[in-house]
Structures are given as structure tokens and as C-alpha cells.
Image: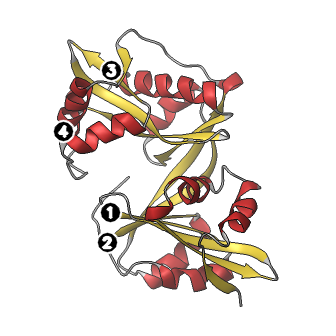
Amino acid sequence: MATIIRVDESNAPQILESLRVDVMKHVFAFYDLQHDPEHTAIYAAFENKKLRGYILIYTALEWTSVILESDQTSAKQLIAYAPEDHFIIHTPPDLSTIIKTRFPHSQDYLEDWMTVKKEEARPVRSNLVHRLSSPQDSLELAKLLTTRSDRPIGDQNKYDEWIRRMPMYGVFLDSELVAYAGSFIQLPQVWMIGGVFTNPTFRNRRYATLATSAITEEALRNAGIAALFVRSDNYAAIGAYGKIGYRKIGEKLWVDVGTGLRP
């Protein structure tokens, strides 16, 4: 049986060295532990001084986000550290039985994990796309996201902070923001792309492709890889990302425990 430890300032360097072996695989833990430790709790499983897995609980979002990355045996121990309810957990598909046993009423969705390197990228450029930077852009982002019924609506301060903290690009039609994409993790090894969304009235016009292309270009000017997750049954999005150059490298489970949210 593995020994479980709570990661803190004293042992964080040891954990980071273990994660550094595969930053892409451990991108959330590698980033959160360094850049937002205040909202990050990690319990790590060690056996014979070797890291066997970990569970990460991140509390800076409207809902708690959990990452479970582990072998089967240690995952059975680590899942005990998950919250009781109302969170999203991201985990490899082979741990689905362990998640379902602990949370039998959870709902899971399979996601494709896609990446692109600079030499593989085929971005689609347009003068309709601009980087979000101003208070007016923040206001437009707030208006755009009121059309997204599957997520909590934030206040203006939230979107001001997003624009300050995260590179984000949008497609504007007559000064109206109709689609956007951004990067919520920026590391020298990889940028994670996310938040891709188009106003339902303007879908099927390749606007999400334009916004994703723009943030991907910036990502690949600063990192070796751009990466994203997309639901495995979202064939239109997968096709669009493929045209930009993204290729599937694996799968993850997005598991809802009591939030009602979907990827």
C-alpha cells in the first residue's frame, strides 16, 4: 500500500521533479502547484520513494476541479480525498470504475486530448480576429457568455480579470464579439487552449476556428506545444481543430459529480 502525503512547501520541489518528467501529462498539477498554490491541494501517493499518483483539488473556479492521475491501486486510496459532492473530476478512462464505485450517481463524458506543434500548425487567419485587451472587450465577453446556458454567468470583474490574466482572442462582427478562445495555462513546454465558444446564432461559420487559430499561433510562439480537450462526440469541433493541425494523443474522462455541468 502506498503512503499518502499532503504536498506543502517542504516537499513540493520533490513532487515537481517527478512531474517534470512528463509536463504534458501532468500539466494541471505542474502549473497549479507553482502558480496558484493558494487554491491547490495535492495528495500524493508514494511507494518505495516513487510517485505512484496524486489527486489535486483546485478551488479557484465557480466549482471545484479535481485531477486524479494514478495507477489503479493508488487511485483507490487517493479517491478518498475527493470532495463529497459538487465538483468536476478529470481522470484517465481506465480509472472510471474507481470513480463510479465512489460516486455511483456521477455522469462521465469522454474527451479527446489533442495537441499541435509549430511545424504542424495550419492556422486560419482573418482580420475579424483581435486579441481581447480593453474594458469594452471585457464587456463584450460578458455579453457573449450570457448566451451560454450551460455555465454560471460571472460579473464584469470576473471578465476583466480573465483578460488581464489570460491571452484571449475573439471574432468581432460590427464591434460585436461572436466567438472567442483563450489559454488558461501557459508554460514553456505547453499552452492549454480552452474556453472556445461561439454565440449560438453565429455557429457553423468557422468563427471558433478563427479564434482558436489565433490563440494557437500565440501559444506556439511561446511554447513547444499547444493542447486542448474536446468531447469525443463533438465531431464538428474535432474536425475544425484537425484542420488547424491538432492531432489526438489520448483520452480523458470529464466526470460530473453533482454540478450538472457538461464539457
Residues at discs 1 and 2 in contact (Cβ within 8 Å): yes
Give the number of the mark in front: 3 or 1. Answer: 1
| CA separation in Å, label 4 and label 2 | 23 Å
| CA separation in Å, label 1 and label 4 | 20 Å
N-terminal of the pair, mark 1 or mark 4, is 1
Name the side, left or right, on which 232 lies relative to 26: left
In the image shown, does 62 or 211 lie closer to the viewer? 62
Q: Of helix, strand and loop, which one carries label 4?
A: loop
Which residue corresponds to the image point at 35% horizontal and 30% vertical from the top-left?
180
N-terminal of the pair, mark 3 or mark 2, is 2
Residue 225 lies in quadrant = top right
| CA separation in Å, label 1 and label 2 | 7 Å
Which residue corresponds to the image point at 43% horizontal and 25% vertical from the top-left?
209
Q: Of helix, strand and loop, which one carries label 1?
A: loop
Q: Amino acid at mark 4?
A: Thr
Q: Is residue 134 above or below residue 200?
A: above
N-terminal of the pair, mark 3 or mark 1, is 1
N-terminal of the pair, mark 1 or mark 2, is 1
| CA separation in Å, label 3 and label 1 | 28 Å
Q: Is residue 97 visible?
A: yes
Q: Is residue 142 above or below residue 2?
A: above
| CA separation in Å, label 3 and label 2 | 33 Å
Residue 182 x, y percent position in the rendering: 43, 34
In the image shown, does 254 or 65 lie closer to the viewer? 65
| Dot label at residue 171 | 3
Find disc 1 in the rendering and name its residue: 63
Q: Farthest residue in the top direction?
A: 127
Q: Amino acid at mark 1?
A: Trp
Find disc 2 in the rendering and name its residue: 86
Q: Amino acid at mark 3?
A: Val
Residue 170 lies in quadrant = top left
